[in-house]
Image (tube, grey):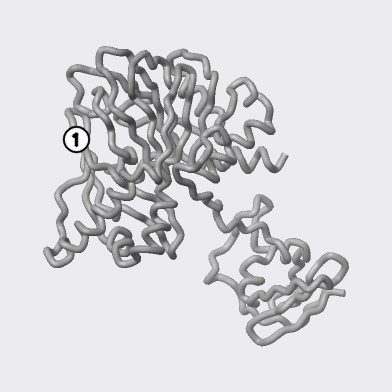
Amino acid sequence: MIKLAATSTELTISWPDGVSRQYLWKWLMDNDPRRRHAGGQKLEQTFDMPECKAMHFSVESDQLVVEWTSGKSHFDIDWLRDPGLQDGPVLIHWDRTLDVETLSFNYAQLQENATFTAFLQAVTDYGWARIEGVPEESVNVCEFAERFTFVRETNYGRYFDVKVDGSAVNLADTALALPLHTDNPYREPPPSLQVLHCLLADTEGGDTILADGAAISAKLVDEHPAQFRLLAETPVQFRFADETCVHESSIPVIQAPAGNFYQMRFNSRSIQPFQMPTDVMADYYSAYELLERYLSDPAYQVRFRLAPGDLIVFSNYRVLHGRSAYKSEGRRHLQGCYADMDGLRSTLARLKAT
């Protein structure tokens, strides 16, 4: 039998299996089904609520019935026990011990909902996944991304090519090594998802390198909390400009509201000279160099070679990516596009609900 106990400010509901929940009277009034549209959206602002005074309350069948001075409300008792509120994704941290094969999927098998769901879950949990056997055709990267999200067009276009260009403005279009980084930190907001498709890989070198920004952030919290606070609280400037655009942002390298990792912005090519008081700057340099050392440590990296037909999807907020140098006389061609993680999570939630 469900038991109810009340004070002037809250109601406690206790279920027979020992589960107990507390609810502010104001919360119950704020979530009164009468105050929501059939689609679930609130019809009134919170400050427009009537007085939250309960005159009588009881459980009738599968409903909590509350009689207020302003009328009567009915709440589904199962919903009160589990209103379906999400705490956010649980991030699985990883380092070089990660078995890349556990995050590898076959393109043909992604036609099955179960496999496609597992792929999206891997990107959510680990921040990335690899697809093998994607047809080696131009712009397939966009078509694949649109299966689970919307492509985000930028000044680089709907998609972009990564290959040696003798007149390159961006180091990505050279054969040089690229240190670990996130893309577009100068945007507000940066694309939260990136997709890269390998079309050609006829050269030595050019290995893909990935690192888990969430795991490294947690390492800093545990072992170097003062340096972490500097990186999470001190804004730095990022900038990119060419003949078509000027993009600038000022934001901390790590965002971790309430201690929960959200984003890392790290890009040695677009970061600008630090602008902060010199007494802060000396300590900040120490913290920034510590982060660089973590990111450069092979212990926190996974490396693999992308073959033609391979495609990787990764969180641009969490997973830092780079590559080893390769011989420019060879041929290496990747095609990429940007997208956003909310589309992927929406598709995943919809698939899991069916």
Which quadrant of the rendered structure holds the N terminus?
A: bottom right
Residue 171 lies in what quarter of the image? top left
Q: In the image, what residue occupies the spot 29% across and 55% down?
A: 252
Q: Is residue 317 visible?
A: no
Q: Which residue is mark 1?
A: 241
| Residue under the point 58% across and 22% down | 107
Q: Position of residue 329 (x, y in %)?
A: 25, 12
In the displayed structure image, the side of residue 72 where residue 93 appears, left or right? left
- The residue under label 1 is which amino acid type? Ala
Give left or right: position of 48 versus 185: right
Viewed as shown, does residue 33 lie left or right of 262? right
Is 4 situated above or below 248?
below
State the image coordinates of residue 117 (x, y, percent, origin top left): 64, 36
Q: Is residue 27 above or below residue 152?
A: below
Residue 106 in the image: state x and y as whole percent.
59, 24
Which residue is painted at 68% across and 61% down in the image? 83
